[in-house]
Amino acid sequence: MVASDSGFPAASIILVDDDVPGDRRVERVLEAAPKPHWVLDIRVRGSESALGRARDLGRAAWLAACGLRGALQRRRQLGQVLEARHPPLAGLAACFCSTVRALAASRQLSEQLASRPGPLLIHANDLVAGLAVTLARPQGQARFVYDSHEFQIQRHRRAGWLRILIEHEFERKVIEAAHEVRTVNRAVAGAMQRVHPTLRKAPRVIANDVYAHHEVAAAPAEQRPALVHIGKGTRGRLLERLDLPPEQLGFEVHAWLLGSSLPPGLRGEHFALGAASYEGEVLALLTERRCLMWCGLDRSSLSYRLATPNKLFQALAFGMPIVASPDTYLAELVERHGIGVVDDGDLPTLARRVQSQAYEGWVASVTSLRARLRNEPELF
């Protein structure tokens, strides 16, 4: 680590692409970052002048074109790890817009760096933020940490091959510039090493184990069980599978959307929607009926298949078993540690299993695993 005379960076700049309050991974970074620290939100607008906007668009186009260097060879290599099921141009406009954002953020970061000489930690959360740091080219006593919150180059469910190839090249440059690379679990770390052969050292795994643990005994089996969803993300979570009357589904559905909304086409008329401050309501629900955390995921992107989402750690904190989609890393964790079930498509039958002694075994496994995870973070 680049250090000051006292042995530590003298200050830090944290790049984010979402609201910080409620993002506990970023909040943890801020708590640990050297003080004083500055937060740079990369959701910034580009140049205000027509000439500046034209310059940004031209440079973004150039960067995207450079991102396709060696595309045919890389396409063959990446095809051994992932597949894109969508048209080649899918997601290209969004990729272009994020590149423009990275350019604008890099200018802001360059201004910050010019005014803050001395030992400095720069922590970039996710790929666009990492690209902004790479474009700013920090020099001297700056230490750059690239924190990939998921598998970045196929994080979007509808990304086509052109976007994947461009962002693969962007991430290669970010990794080359970074002093440290972090990610969320061993599966993502391994996939990053496979798609980036120059990444010789495995990324440092920091799990999203950031929630206070609660002691909640398994509720009696008299009441109808519940499926629980917590999170702003509602697309690609297979919530449409739950859009049925409770007597048909076998479960009540309780959702805490944290300020978000259900995706178009999903009626959700049988969903019980909770408040943004979900913790107390979930704990009360757990005392009334047996609950499973719904961790259903669309498997069209490798990022989703390898994910250990926040709701997994929320479930562990509540002592709540989970339902995982098949052929995912979450399904592997369920089978390895006995912390719930893999969805086989038959939710009414699952509801009956929840009312059996099997549920109490899942709860015991959850309680055991979460205690181990605090002492053995490499488990995930």
Image (tube, rainbow, N blue to C red):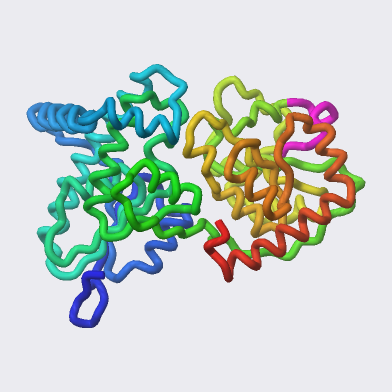
Residue toward you, 60 or 196:
196
Q: Give the x, y percent position of residue 284.
A: 75, 54
Q: Image check: 94 left or right of 47?
A: right
Q: Against 122, is 134 above or below?
A: above
Q: Against 266, is 377 above or below?
A: below
Q: Residue furthest bottom?
A: 6
Q: Image check: 33 left or right of 117?
A: right
Q: Which residues are magenta?
A: 244-253
- The quarter of the displayed image where residue 251 is located: top right
Residue at 84% over, 34% down:
349
Q: Image check: 354 left or right of 319?
A: right
Q: In the rendered image, which quarter contains the C terminus?
A: bottom right
Whether the magenta-drawn stretch holds residue 69 is answered as: no
Q: Give the x, y percent position of residue 327.
A: 61, 36
Residue at 58% over, 71% down:
375
Q: Residue furthest right?
A: 222
- The quarter of the displayed image where residue 252 is located: top right
Q: Residue furthest left?
A: 51
Q: Give the x, y percent position of residue 360.
A: 83, 55
Residue at 66% over, 53% down:
315
- Tell how many labels: 0
Q: In the rendered image, which quarter contains the N terminus?
A: bottom left
Residue at 37% over, 41% down:
195
Q: Give the x, y percent position of residue 46.
A: 19, 36
